[in-house]
Amino acid sequence: MGKSKTTKFKRPQFNAVGLPVTAVKEAAAEEEAFADDDDDCPAVELLEKLESPSADVRECACAGISRVVQQSQSIPSFLQRDAVRRLGPMLLDSSLAVRETAAGALRNLSACGGPQVCEDMVKRDVMTPLTALLRNCCAGFDGAAVPTKEPKNQAENVLNEAVSLLWNLCESSNQALFLFNKSGLLDVVVHCLERHPHNVELATSAAHCLHTVSEDNPELLCSINGHVHGALEGILLSNQPGMAHTLLRTLAAGSLWNMMGSLPAARQAQTLTAVLTTVSQCLDLDAGELIPQLHRAEEARFKDAPPASGIEAHVSGEPAVEEMDEEGTAQRVKNGDSDDDFSDLLPRELEELREAAALLTAQQTSLEILVNMCCSDDPSDDEWEESSSGDESEATADGFSSLMSPLCLSAEVHAALINHNIPEKVLKKTLFPKQEAMDVCRQTTNWRGLQKKMRRVQSRALTCLHSILSGMDAESLGGAEALQQAAQHLSALVFGAPEIPKDEEFLEAVISAMRALLQMTTSKNIPLSINLQQLMSLSEAASRCDVVSVRVNAVAILGITGSTLAKEKGSAPTLEMIGSGLLQVATNDADLVVNGEALDALFDVFADGKEAETAAKSIQLLPALKMLQPVFKAKIRKAGRDEYSPQQLCVLDNVRVNLRRFIGYLETLAKK
């Protein structure tokens, strides 16, 4: 129902997977139920120990809380006992060890609890002691060289936990973001970034935080100065080896892209080149080769090392291996999209696993930067509903000009993407993960979570391919031959296995890429070898998917295909099959958006031509639409205002009007 548009990737936020979003609200109601079980509840004992005069006891209590809250079902018992306010003063404890473990406990509470827990933490004033702790830690480093004393190293560990907590809160809570701006914490984050030659872990936490807070934050951009730009550019120019540094450089590149509007015009071209150079170098890395190498290195190291005591795995914010979920990942859930970025929560002794996770996070972030780069900043372009169905009814003779997304790339970005071979590199990342890498991860408990991260990189690459296809012209992408090869590649991804993949994230990404490719090739009259049976099976698989955009794009693909075939002689039987499928979706799908897209596709397929006219009569399209018309109108009136946005309702109303017109058009044909 209009152009295919990729929504920009926003800063990653919490998904209500671990703790239900109602948990905080229900905590008070559950208090009585817990009252009888106080003796058996670990929260009671651990929180009481926070009041101990012994620093060792307080440290152990904080470490215990840090571990227990990783099991999200335990979080309500801590919240109802005001754990946030009781842990807050521990951030300013006289003991550095207590500060570190307290920050780790609050960090895990925020990471495993979800958005509602983060909002609750901010409401309980966690930002006040956290801000004081951050400033206190940084003050100790002013003018200092490389830290050499153990207390100073521990102070940096405290700072790392505190910055990670700040990151979690700001990515989930608008109030935390407001307080970040108000408190002027940007200088603290930049100070941590500048420690990157000596403490990459601290710098990476700060880079994550800055990448988060710089997204769509005009107030912060007003305070960005040359010092901030210089710190980020210094990271991009660094050449330290290792995946941790690769991730750090990628996050710095993402922050610079977010800040592009605050840069002087004379520096923007240079910065764009630096950002794309970093992204390009990251995408050049072959995770399918590197992950097995890292796994073999870990095996060799463990073979020569004495058995670990396991104590290290339980300190601060680091989960023990046995406490990870069935995929081998610590539960860290984000809003809107389960991010599964657990690299910063892994025990420090799992060096190779941390490197592998950092590599995949860096590549995912690189692809998300490219998606945002290729997307217009115009909020009206964010969703399908912004393109009027009524406009499409006025389409030109080929029926497709209105389906195409307008090219939204500036000449500078367009040229830079081509110069760095970004389209080619993105296409390579859309391949399925190499089997050897998947096998070594599946066979090792700690590494299993990387399987999902590898699949996510592939899905991000497909989404990025969609953005590139929507924002660049065919000639820049290699012309007809390159687009035909891309079509064969996408078909192999979807139809190469005996069954169409059921993974919703993959389906959403690959179908959107297929739609964008079909839109481009159709507009340029580039022929594609289309297997209709495969497309129908894809549509059927999509109809069972819960993700609305998957169903919408599958219907759009049928519409584009049918519109093309309608121009060919002898295509009536094929159009009958497509028309029947679209009618079924328009009638039976539970979502009005999908219904509207299916009707729009029907208008396109049967708009003109003898073959379309013959097929329409064969499937009795006119009586079917007459029967559907009052039902569709009633559904809009009944469910629309409660379930759909004003923009969606506007487009659905256009579909309703066009349905009436199209029925009139078919009636005119029937009278001939």
Image (cartoon, helix red, strand yellow):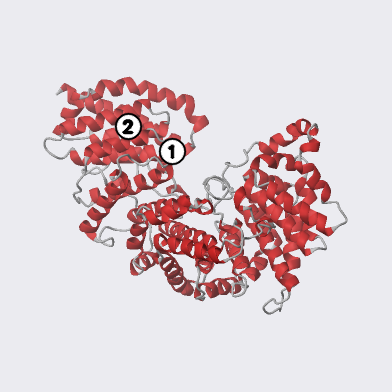
Could you tell me the amino acid type at mark 1?
A: Val
In the depicted view, which residue is nearer to us: 648 or 308? 308
Q: Which of 124 and 435 is in front in this view?
A: 435
Residue 205, quarter of the rendered image? bottom right
Q: Mark 2 points at which residue?
A: 599
Identify the residue shown where x is 69% and y is 65%.
157
Q: Residue 546, position in %: x, y?
A: 44, 35
What whole-number distance in Å separates the C-alpha atoms at marks 2 and 1? 19 Å
- SS under mark 2: helix
Residue 310: mark: none
* Dot 2 amino acid type: Leu
Label 1 environment density (alpha carbons within 10 Å; few <14, some 14–19, many ≥20): some
Residue 547's tag is: 1
Q: Bin the neighbour count of mark 2 within 10 Å (Cα to Cα): few under 14, some 14-19, many 20 and up.
A: many
Image coords of residue 521 (percent x, y): 24, 51
Visible residue check, residue 258? no
Residue at 54% in and 72% down: 235
| Front residue of this view, candidates 569 and 96 | 96
Quadrant location of the C terminus in the rendered image: top left
Residue 324 x, y percent position in the rendering = 59, 48
The answer to whether residue 49 shows anywhere in this view is yes
